[in-house]
Each structure stands twice: as C-alpha cells, then as structure tokens.
Image (spheres, grey):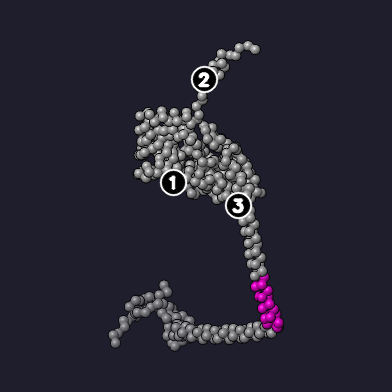
Amino acid sequence: MGPEPRGGATTLNLFQEADALSVTELTFHIRRLFDEDSLLNRVAVRGELSNFRRHHSGHCYFTLKDSAAALRCVMFRSRAVSLRFEPADGMQVRVLGRVAVYERDGSYQLYVDSMVADGLGDLSVAFARLREKLLEEGLFDDSRKQPLPLLPRAIGVVTSPTGAALRDIVTVARRRHAGIPILLAPVAVQGEEAPEQIVRGIQLLDRSGRVDVIIIGRGGGSIEELWAFNDERVVRAVAAATTPIVSAVGHQTDYTLSDFAADRRAATPSQAAEIVTPDRLALIQRLRTNQHRLNQSLLNRLIRRRLRLERCLASNLFRRPQEILQERMQRLDQLQDRLAGAVETLLNRKQQRWQLANEKLNLLDPLRVLQRGYSVVRRQDGQVVRRAETVGQGDRLDVWLQEGRLGVVVTETEKARQS
C-alpha cells in the first residue's frame, strides 16, 4: 500500500498527542473568557423588546434586537421588582447588565440588572401608524362585521400546510363536527412572500363560493414572525372579503391588524375552530329540544281546539238551531215594529212643522192684505209708492187690486199730517 496523505497523518498525530476536551471543559473555558472581559461584565445595551415573557416565578425572559442581530436576555425576579413600567413587545429599551455563558444550552445571554424605556421600536411605530390610517378609513368599524354562519357548508383555512395551526384547526373541527369539509389555501405565513400569498389565498377561497367562513392565522411568534398579518395588503383583503373571516394569529396576547379587520378574532387557531365549527352533539340535542317543543306546542294547540269544538257542539246553536232562529225572527219583528213607529212619529212631527210654516207664510202673503180692501201702488219702473211726496202731478201709476189693475194719473198730492 502507498503512503497515507499528509493531511490525514497530521490529524491522526494530533489526536494521538493530546486528549480531546469535553463539552463542559470547553464551555467552562469560554465562560472564563467572558468573565475576564471587563466590557462584558458591565455593559449597557439598547434595543427593541421581543418575545417578552414574565414567568410565574417572577423572572423575565425576552430578546433584545435591532435590524441586524438579536440577544437573549434574562432579568431575575430580584431585579424585575424594581421596574417602573410594564415591558411589552415592540418597546425600545436600554438595559444594564453582564454578558455570560449559559452552560446548559451552550449559549450566551445578557443578565439584566436594570431596564428603562426608550420609546417604541420601528415595527411598533409602523404598526401604530398603519392602524391609525386604516382606522380613519373605517376598515375596523363594527358596522362592517358580518355574522358567522350557524352551520357552514365548508370551512376555508389560509395558513401554512406544515404549521401547528392547521393541525390544531383540523383536530378541533373533526372532534366537533367531522361532516364539515375543510378547504386549505396553503401559504407562507412569514417572510417577504407571505403577504402576497395570504392575499391570494383569501381571494381564492372568497371567490370560489365553496366556503361559508374562512380562518386565517398561524401559531405564536415574535412581532417579526407575525408581521405578514400586519401588512396593509393583507388587512385590506380581509376587510374586502364577502365571506366572514375569523383571524387567529399567534397566541392570546398577540394582536395584529388583521384581527381588527376580521369579522371575529380568536385567541388561538384552536379557538377559531371552536368558533366556526358547531358541536354536532349540541346541534342534535338542540334539534331534539326544538322538536319536543314543537310537538308539545302542536299538542297543546290541538287540545285547545278540541275543547273549543266540544263547547261548540254542546251549545244551543248546534243542539237546537231552530229555537235560536225563531228567537232571532221574533227579535227582527220587534225591531221592524219599532222602526215603523219611529218613522211614523218622525213624519207626524215633520207634518206639524210644515203646517206651522205654511200658516206663517199665509199671514205674510200680500194677497191676503189685498183681500181686505187694500191696494198696492207702483210707479212705472215697478217701485212701490210709500209716500205722497215721492210722486208729482201728471205721474202715471199702477194700482194693483185684489182683482185687476188700474192705470191712473196723479192730479193732486198731499203730504201726511202729523198726528
């Protein structure tokens, strides 16, 4: 056999000349390097809070990040009690502490002694500005919200085909009502291409006419990982959909702009499945209850109608209808007699009034005056002469008598004497 390669011999000699370090020994060596570095023992760091979590023990775990890097941090309870504000994801903060190696994970992290707020991070500022803009446009108004169907024909899901969100939705939906089909629009839920894919998925399901409700979402994550659901294109697609949409992005404490635009927000994908999928057993029980109520209502109505029929059959109308008819005929005769008497009385009163009026007219009749020897003197123009001074000698007058008329010429006038 020929000689071994030079490189292989060197590597073999290295293993033969020295013992290999254990992982613990190497990690301890790196930790000692960190501990001996004065800069790392007391360092101030500025960055944006992400994935902040306060453990039930009181310790706080979070990540400080900027546009290019991220740093794991821990703030123990003894230090966290001195905080003057409640940290939240997206806040820009300044922290003071020391950097050391966490031997169990073989990673380094910042042990924070104090923290002060230093404004909002870039993503949080962008979130607030876009939210204000869309709020003014009315995209989040309650009047735009659509009711969810009681029993959807099919459920549409816009999410990653490999994520835990889809598994949770399918598991819950199958448990509650296995007969409702689920249509998936597979999309990326983070990254640069995610917003456009999510928009296409929403539009595809919305325009298909095959689903009655749509779930969009993904599992939990940092604000960066959830940012696709804060994209303006996605928010507008959610608001423009005619199919009701349930937004289930992240965990219960995570809020995205898609949550505000959707018709309903769910804290988790599992809860979204609970909301849109009716419980089959509960539906069956509800149908049985309604059927029982309907049967009972029909039975009660039938009993009331039967009792009413029995009362009608027991009444005189059905037992002796001839007697009731005879009573009505007798009553009709009485009413006719009363009507005839009233008409006769009314006619008598009218006749008496007519006679009185006729007598008054006769008294005022001028012919009656002429019958007593009086006459009526008129001028040629038809005016009645009442005073002697209104005529003169030579005037021609007509004298009307009880029978006939006289034409006379005035030869003499005399004024009336004072009594």
- Judging by the rendered image, the residue that carries numbered circle 3 is 278
Q: Is residue 48 left or right of residue 188?
A: left
* Mark 3, secondary structure of its residue: loop
- Judging by the rendered image, the residue that carries numbered circle 2 is 17
Q: Which mark is residue 57?
A: 1
Residue 378 percent across, percent down from the top left? 41, 77
Looking at marks 1 and 3 on the same chain, the residue that comes earlier in the sequence is marked by 1
Q: State which quadrant residue 299 falls in.
A: bottom right
Kind of residue at disc 1: Ser
- Which class describes the residues within 10 Å of circle 1: few (<14), some (14-19), or many (20+)? few
Quadrant housing the C terminus: bottom left
Range shown magenta = 302-322
User: Residue at left 65%, top 73%?
Assistant: 304
Up/down of 214 relative to 297, above or below: above
- Which residue occupies the foreground of this view, 411 or 402? 402
| Cα distance between the residues tagged 3 and 2 | 71 Å
* Mark 1, secondary structure of its residue: loop
| Cα distance between the residues tagged 1 and 2 | 49 Å
Count every numbered label the image shows and give the total: 3
User: Residue at left 35%, top 79%?
Assistant: 387
Residue 383 percent across, percent down from the top left? 40, 75
Residue 155 percent across, percent down from the top left? 61, 45
- Which class describes the residues within 10 Å of circle 3: few (<14), some (14-19), or many (20+)? some
Looking at marks 3 and 2 on the same chain, the residue that comes earlier in the sequence is marked by 2
- Which residue occupies the foreground of this view, 136 or 402? 136
Task: Please state which of the two labelled residues, at mark 1 or mark 3, is closer to the viewer.
Answer: 1
